[in-house]
Amino acid sequence: MNGTSKLQARKAPGPGRPFVNRKVEIDRISTKLKTGIAGEPMPLVVTCFWGAYGMGKSWLLLHLEDLYKGRALEDPGPCPVIVARLDLDQERSASLWHENELQRGKLIQELWMQLALQMGEGVPDLGGRASDEHWAEAFVQQVTEWAASAVTPLIMLDTLDALVRQNDTSFYWLEEHLVERLAITDRVLFVFAGRGELRRWERFQVRRRVDLHRLSSFREQEIGEELGASRPWSRVLYQLAFGHPLTAELLGTQLEKQGIDLGAEDASIDKVEPGLAGEVLAHVVEEALEGLEESLHHLARPASLLRWLNVESLRALVEDLGLGEANRGDAYYMRIIEALQAQHLLYWHTNKKVYEPDPVLRALLSAYLERAHLDRFLAVHRAALSFHDRRLEKQPSYLSTFLPEIMYHYVQLSRREPAGQRPAFGDWWAQFLRDSPPRDAASWQELVEALEDDQELMALAPEEYKMVVSDAETRAQQR
């Protein structure tokens, strides 16, 4: 295979793939709809599913549409479900956009048409000069009447974060003229999907009805179910895709095209051509970075290898690797972080007060850099290690903040540095215990607690992990 052009961007797996996992999410919606079908008010009618690129948000909405659309005459209960679903992605729904502006009236008419077809009705002619507000008012009145006596409307909008990012005026218009007016009835269920958390609702009656849910990556078993793969092949695909549903599906499809039987028991990672795996990773990275300003791509890839990010760590990375001008102020680096956050490549961690990449996307970007640009991969980890080491020396009380990162970057370097140059975390740790200033028991206890929550380090470096936890526990018990 040559280049990524043969891999097409997609919103869901290819035909014939079974819908798997997401039982919690499906149950969440079905429980609300059962209440609606019984003719009762539904709880938390503004449901927002969010997660990183390729986690299956669109797949989930498509599956919900398949479950409920066209079943209004079959569903038992006074108020069966009718469904409308739209994707707000500009490329996939070009008719809803004009010069980067959402055509609000067209969106309302499309939703109306989808629901009216299931009611055996049509969309009225409001005249060519009807305003967007006029269309919204008429639609809300009609849907409210249907919901009050006959049906339970389910309205789904995919890629809503694109609207927040590109045309937030229209986002707030939809909130005021559509979402709020129907949500307050508690008889219309909204389901939204996007890469971000979708917390920017302004109106109180909407905010009090919001139900946020983050989509997680797949486990090994679920990867196998998605692709109809044997346990050995499930393990191989999970190792290559890190549980990322779309990456696993792309890899599985390409392997099948090469004549590989994913149901066979004789699976081996050696049977996956390095070029194929590299091509799929390159494609996923390219799609994940889509929409980000091109001039920031060279920063986004290395920055995504860090487990957390702030202004200081980004500055150290940029200056150590020569990725930009030296001696730039905090505002310059904050603008970069905000741009990465706007594209949902970074998420703010409220408790830690730092920015974090999605862990699965970070793993994919790391695997891509390791395969395609090993020198850059190693340079990033060296720079990050140096930063955390320096910070720990200057701020010895922040043991639980910097030591896990030092350990992480040491382990990553030890995997790929040339023989004779591989740093040994054990040597660094022994010297650290010998030479570092005394710390109180509370600092060591904080480190123990931080490591107990760090499943990634536990899996990545079990021996080093046990050594550090044991030594830290000993010191935490000394009073």
Image: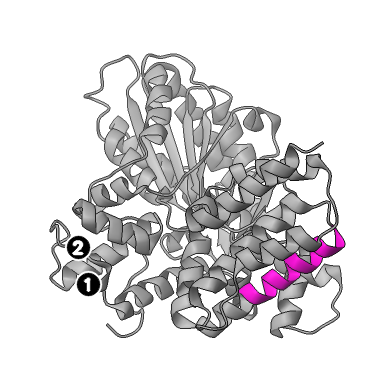
Who's the residue at 33% across and 50% down the image?
Answer: 220
Image coords of residue 338 (percent x, y) = 71, 62
Which label is found at residue 366? none
Front in this rendered view, residue 322 or 139: 322
Q: Which residues are magenta?
A: 381-395
Q: Quick check: 332 left or right of 308?
A: right
Quarter-of-image position of residue 306: bottom right
Q: Amino acid at mark 2?
A: Ala
Q: Is residue 329 above or below residue 101?
A: below
Image coords of residue 214 (percent x, y) = 51, 42
Image coords of residue 407 (percent x, y) = 63, 61
> SS at mark 2?
loop
- Asked if one can make out residue 304 in the rendered structure from this viewpoint, the answer is no
Who's the residue at 79% across and 84% down the image?
Answer: 325
Front in this rendered view, residue 136 or 73: 73
Q: Is residue 58 above or below residue 432?
A: above
- Asked if one can make out residue 413 in the rendered structure from this viewpoint, the answer is yes
Which label is found at residue 271? 1
Q: Which residue is mark 2?
A: 267
Is residue 392 within the magenta segment? yes
Image coords of residue 165 (percent x, y) = 62, 58
- Asked if marks 1 and 2 touch (Cβ < 8 Å), the reply is yes
Who's the residue at 64% across and 80% down the image?
Answer: 295
